[in-house]
Amino acid sequence: MAEYVLQKGLQTPDKIALAIVSPTGAERWSYERLRSAVLGTAQALLQQGLKPGDRVLMRLGNRVEFPVLYLAAIAVDLIPVPTSAQLTEPEVAKIIDIVSPELIVAGTGVAVPQAEAIPLISAEEMRGYYDLAPAQFARGDPNRAAYIIFTSGTSGNPQAVTHAHRAIWARRMMFDGWYGLTPDDRMMHAGAFNWTYTLGTGLMDPWTVGATALIPAPEVTAVQLPLLLKRHDATLFAAAPGVYRQMMRVAFPPMTKLRHGLSAGEKLPAVTRKEWTDATGTTIHEAYGMSECSTFVSGCEAKPAPLDTLGFPQPGRKLAVLGPDGSVAFDEPGRLAIGSDDPGLMLGYWNKLKNAPEPIQNDWFLSGDSMSMAPNGAITFLGRSDDILNAGGFRVSPVEVESAFNAHPDIHECAAVEARLGEDTSVIALHYVSDHDIDGLDHFAATSLARYKQPRIFTRIDALPKSANGKIQRRVLREMSGSYDGKT
């Protein structure tokens, strides 16, 4: 996979592969420098005594060390585990229990549990590896494990999604089916490096075709992005809907080079799409996917998504909308599924890895979302088939949020749901049972949950609504949350 990503850059060694941009300047990396840093770091990892299949836990921020380490580990058959810099020590400890890393690489100020048995390397130390003699790419079966990413599961435990080297090849179906990506593009992505949306769309895919990746520095705010898009001649821009929404607070300069925007992570509100088009004169092409298979439904320049739909299956994908007895009729609701032989589909979950992906039903991998398919193939999103929360594009398990707050000594019981504050805004709301209103729950959350997992609304109720068999009726709580006036 790593060799595949960097191969095209051999033809243009002096071209800028990566620029980390801010209002005050940019840190630029040529393809030659990037390749050298990756293979030098790979050599250092081997010198640590790591063996093929060993996991490397990545605790890094949005700096160049992130993609360098990610590709370096993959280059020599190690398995990188990218994680969000926002995670707290208890959250990281759960990940360590699942993947048992042989090495941790951490940036300054990023939470890392005390684990004396696991060697720890700082980002500063890693930078000294860039000029080492280059390691050789390890080649082998494209179906072997390449990297692990984490997603929240309905059980509340983090799920270690394990992808094969072949996953990078499968991403080619997005080039024409979503991006319209060419070597001349300058792709700006406003997302954290640990997110597969950023790693794939923002970095790996541009490098695969020899394009330039533009990544905002960690200190850049959403309202500064329009200026950076103009200043750095971005031709494509990718972000979650929440970022687009924040950008609309400022006036946009003329953007003659920009072709269109890309959106994924959650459903893009129609009002946000219109505001973007009014501000830039371009459209936004939306995509749907999941951590287990990245994106596989999208609109594109050649085939825009019909109004109120997500788009079409990308060329080469095999999709179906299934009910209890198999495929449903056109325009009827069901669970969206993708063929279990899709090359981009995960190998399985690391902590319960099997010989085939899961959950599988009759050669289909089932998503957790309800969809319908029109006779022309357009896919319409109808809602979630589970209770996973969507906070700013991040999928969050309610059980994980509830577990954190159930540790509070004054909370008897609680439930987390998604609260819609408007057509284009949703947050996490926590309903809790206690003898009194509790102050400082937001500060309590910060000790055990990443920022994006923390509720913004707290409501004390006398009792949680439950069904006859004792299950929490989250639908009732969501209806209660829908009455908020936007104050959090």
Image (cartoon, rainbow, N blue to C red):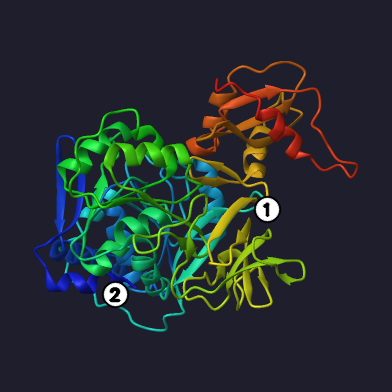
| Residue 59: % across, % down | 39, 49
Q: Residue at x 34, y 67 (%)?
A: 176
Q: Earlier in the sequence, mark 1 or mark 2?
A: 2
| Residue 15: % across, % down | 11, 62
Where residue 252 sits, quadrant-wise, is: top left
Mark 2 secondary-structure assignment: helix
| Residue 187: % across, % down | 26, 54
Which of the pair 364/309 is nearer the observer?
Answer: 309
What type is the residue that disc 1 sits on? Ser
What type is the residue that disc 2 sits on? Tyr
- Residue 29 shown left or right of residue 332 in the figure: left
Residue 51, relative to residue 231: is it above or below? below
Q: Which residue in the structure is indicated by mark 2? A: 4
Q: CA distance from mark 1 to mark 2?
A: 36 Å
- Residue 163 shown left or right of residue 6 in the figure: right
Which of the pair 258/76 is nearer the observer?
Answer: 258
Mark 1 secondary-structure assignment: loop
- Residue 337 shown left or right of residue 475 in the figure: left
Badge 2 local density, few (<14 within 10 Å), some, or many (20+)? some
Badge 1 local density, few (<14 within 10 Å), some, or many (20+)? few
| Residue 372: % across, % down | 62, 59
Q: Is residue 237 visible?
A: yes
Q: Which residue in the structure is indicated by mark 1? A: 385
- Residue 59 shown left or right of residue 341 in the figure: left
Image quarter hosting the N terminus = bottom left
Where residue 464 sits, quadrant-wise, is: top right
Image quarter hosting the C terminus = top right
